[in-house]
Amino acid sequence: MLQSLPYELPELVTRAPLDTHRSTVVPEWVDWNGHMNVAFYVTAFDQASGAFMRNMGLGRRYVDGKLGMTFVLETHVTYDRELREGAPLRFTTQLLARDAKKVHLFHEMYHAEQDYLAATNETIVMNIDYASRRSAPWPVPVAERLDAIWETHKLLPKPAKAGRVMGLSRR
Amino acid sequence: MIDLDLAAPLDRHPATVLSDWIDWNGHMNVGYYVVAFDKATDTLCQQFGCGWEYTRDKIGMTFVLEAHVTYDREVKEGDGLRITTQILDHDAKRLHFIHMMYHAEEGYLAATNELMLMNIDYQTRRSAPWPGFAMERIEKLAAAHATLPRPAQAGRLIGIKKK
């Protein structure tokens, strides 16, 4: 387990949910249906996971310093409403659970001006040792930040769209 | 329309991991797994006449309502992929299925993608029943795929197991 990180960590945001990430639907994300393609919702959410990871003290410097990486194990997306090219996006991220190696996150994606919910993403991200490319416990300073983040996030209600199992409902 | 392929699972979608799909971890990025799977969804939709031409000719569209991805193993630039598809369920407007992505040469399972797809009217952009030509073929495909066991990756609930 890494006891420290060789770079300065950003100021910790414990506000719950985390609401710092912004994005825009770029032309490359639009498909033949004239809206953001399903795959690029996942890309946009992955960038929101990146914002959460940076707040934990991880990110590009963690990988470039050959210290470690974070891998997504599993992800679940609900597509709630279409988004067109140029649409401004804002994200909220709630920490649902964490353990020694993993976090369980829930993102909501909103149209930043019209304020509607466009999609949600529930995801599990795991810490990876750089050399072995296998799972490893969070570095100590990251685990400490995660504990501080959990103190505020654990007070939030569980989102209605979290924990979904896919299926056709029979009427 | 192309000839109907009733092999179960549907196994006619090869792909290759492109350099643009690689991220700073040196492997295929999570979003591009879904790019690859979405192309396999088109291969499935072509089976029942609802692929690219269906939208190009302004007949209808198909929208994904929900998606679940398991990332089982890394794939690298240039790797050959093989994606198979199994229909799990369907109704008048929707189709529930799962893709399995395999490394083509080494044979290992790289990822799975469970999807709920809905038929959309081109003009209103609202849900609509599958056209008759599509429903006829969906029923034949679903009957062929009903002989397969249900994959363990279907119907998963996300969570961290408590020890």
Image: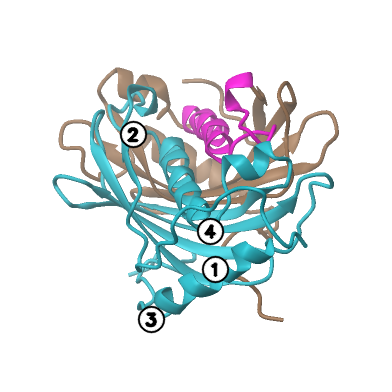
Chain colours: A cyan, B brown
Question: If you read the primary sequence from the N terminus, does the residue marked by circle 2 or circle 4 appear first?
Answer: 2
Question: If you read the primary sequence from the N terminus, does the residue marked by circle 1 or circle 3 appear first?
Answer: 1
Question: Which numbered tag is attached to residue A146?
Answer: 1
At x 57%, y 21%, the residue is B20
Other residues around mark 2 within 10 Å, as few (<14) / some (14–19) / many (≥20): many
Task: Quickly name the residue at label 4.
Answer: A56
Spatial separation of the CA atoms under disc 1 and disc 3: 14 Å
Chain of residue at mark 1: A
| Residue B103 percent coordinates (x, y) | 77, 34
Question: If you read the primary sequence from the N terminus, does the residue marked by circle 2 or circle 3 appear first?
Answer: 2
In the picture, which quadrant includes the C terminus of chain A?
A: bottom left
Helix, strand or loop at disc 2? loop
Question: Mark 1–mark 4 contact, CB under 8 Å?
Answer: yes
Q: Is residue B109 above or below residue A9?
A: above
In the picture, which quadrant includes the N terminus of chain A?
A: bottom right
| Residue A151 percent coordinates (x, y) | 45, 78
Question: If you read the primary sequence from the N terminus, does the residue marked by circle 3 or circle 4 appear first?
Answer: 4
Do callouts 2 and 4 point to residues on the same chain? yes
Q: Is residue A60 above or below residue A122?
A: above
Question: Which numbered tag is attached to residue A155?
Answer: 3
